[in-house]
Image (cartoon, helix red, strand yellow):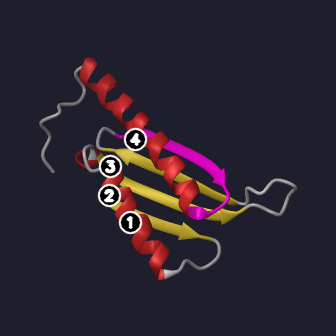
Amino acid sequence: MDVILDAKEGLESELKVFTENRVKFSLKRLFWMVRKVKIQYSAVPSSKATSNQHCVISLETFDHYQIEVSMTARDRRMALEMCLKKIYKLVQKAFHKSQKYGRFSKHVYV
């Protein structure tokens, strides 16, 4: 599983390490199914709401199924957590759907 981080402004090394570890931990049960994960952080222009950090996660599975989720939250860590929670559910759903139609085996070794 490749984790690619992208941000319009610079990322601190602490946030990079946190992001990589959190992604690997969140998808540890389905890591063999995920080929590539791209995480992009950006700041939303100031508005009346307190939400001003935007996180977009797009991933590709080994059967070339693409999933993209975006969330906006107060800080980057919370936006990442919300995206990972949603992405895990969607990867699980894709796994069950592909198993149902016989396109994907749960005994794939990478």
Residue to which mark 3 is pinned: 27
The answer to whether 98 is drawn above or below residue 82 in the figure is above
Q: Amino acid at mark 2?
A: Lys
Q: Position of residue 48 (x, y in %)?
A: 87, 55
Closer to the N terminus: mark 2 or mark 4?
2
**Residue 102: which quarter of the image?**
top left
Q: Position of residue 5 (x, y in %)?
A: 48, 67
Residue to which mark 1 is pinned: 20
Q: Amino acid at mark 3?
A: Leu
- Find out whether the residues at labels 2 and 3 contact each other: C-beta distance under 8 Å: yes
The answer to whether 58 is drawn above or below residue 104 in the figure is below
Cα distance in 3D space between marks 4 and 1 = 15 Å
Closer to the N terminus: mark 1 or mark 3?
1
Q: Residues within 10 Å of mark 3 (few under 14, many from 20)?
A: some
Residue depicted at 25% across the width and 26% down the height: 103
Q: Position of residue 39 (x, y in %)?
A: 50, 59
Q: Nearer the viewer, residue 88 or 6?
A: 88
The disc at residue 88 is: 4
Residue to which mark 2 is pinned: 24
Residue depicted at 38% across the width and 57% down the height: 23
Q: Amino acid at mark 1?
A: Glu
Q: Which residues are magenta?
A: 64-76
Q: Secondary structure at mark 3?
A: loop
